[in-house]
C-alpha cells in the first residue's frame, strides 16, 4: 500500500491546508477589520453560503419531484399502452386493451401468442 497516494492521507493534508489558509486569512482580517468587523463579514459569508445551498437543494428537490412517475395506470408490457379495466376479472384482450370474457372472435388473447 503506497502511503503517499492513500485517499485518507490526501484528504487530511488538503483539509489541514484549507484550515491553515483560513487561519492566515482570519488573522489578517482581524487585524484589518477588528474582531466585530471580522465576525460580521463571517456571518454575511455564512448566510450567503447557506442561502446558495438552500437554493441548490430546492432546485434539486423540484427536479426530482417533477421527474417522478406519479401515474397509477398499469402499462401493457408489450406495447407500453395503458391497460384499461384492470380491476375486472377476465382475460386480457390485446386487440382492445381490455379484460373480457375471452369470447371476442377477433380478439388476441394470451393463448393465441
Image (spheres, grey):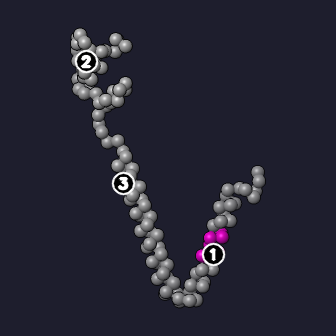
Question: What is the crowding at mark 1: few (fewer than 14 residues within 10 Å), some, or many (at least 20)?
Answer: few
Task: Determine the image quadrant of residue 94.
Answer: top left
Question: What is the crowding at mark 3: few (fewer than 14 residues within 10 Å), some, or many (at least 20)?
Answer: few
Task: Determine the image quadrant of residue 47.
Answer: bottom left
Q: Is residue 97 left or right of residue 13?
A: left
Element type at marker 2?
A: loop
**On-image quarter of the C terminus:** top left
* Residue 111 within the segment the image draws in magenta: no
Q: To which residue does mark 1 refer?
A: 21
Q: Is residue 66 left or right of residue 5?
A: left
Q: To which residue does mark 3 refer?
A: 62
Our reading of the magenta stretch's main secondary structure is helix
Marks 1 and 2, how far apart in space? 73 Å
Q: Above or below — where is 39 with respect to 2?
A: below
Look at 71% across and 56% down and name the residue there.
Answer: 6
Q: Earlier in the sequence, mark 1 or mark 2?
A: 1
Visible residue check, residue 87: no
* Residue 18 within the segment the image draws in magenta: yes
Look at 41% across and 55% down and name the residue there.
Answer: 60
Q: Is residue 103 left or right of residue 69?
A: left
Element type at marker 1?
A: helix
Element type at marker 3?
A: helix
Q: To which residue does mark 2 refer?
A: 90
Q: Position of residue 45 (x, y in %)?
A: 47, 75
Q: Position of residue 53 (x, y in %)?
A: 44, 64
Over which residues does the magenta segment extend? 16-22
Amino acid at each position: 500500500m503506497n502511503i503517499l497516494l492513500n485517499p485518507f492521507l490526501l484528504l487530511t493534508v488538503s483539509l489541514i491546508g484549507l484550515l491553515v489558509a483560513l487561519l492566515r486569512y482570519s488573522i489578517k482580517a482581524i487585524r484589518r477589520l477588528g474582531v466585530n468587523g471580522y465576525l460580521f463579514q463571517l456571518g454575511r459569508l455564512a448566510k450567503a453560503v447557506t442561502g446558495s445551498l438552500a437554493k441548490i437543494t430546492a432546485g434539486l428537490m423540484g427536479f426530482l419531484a417533477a421527474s417522478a412517475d406519479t401515474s397509477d395506470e398499469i402499462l401493457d408490457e408489450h406495447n407500453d399502452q395503458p391497460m384499461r379495466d384492470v380491476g375486472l376479472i377476465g382475460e386480457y384482450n390485446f386487440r382492445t386493451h381490455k379484460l373480457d370474457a375471452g369470447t371476442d372472435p377477433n380478439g388476441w388473447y394470451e393463448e393465441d401468442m
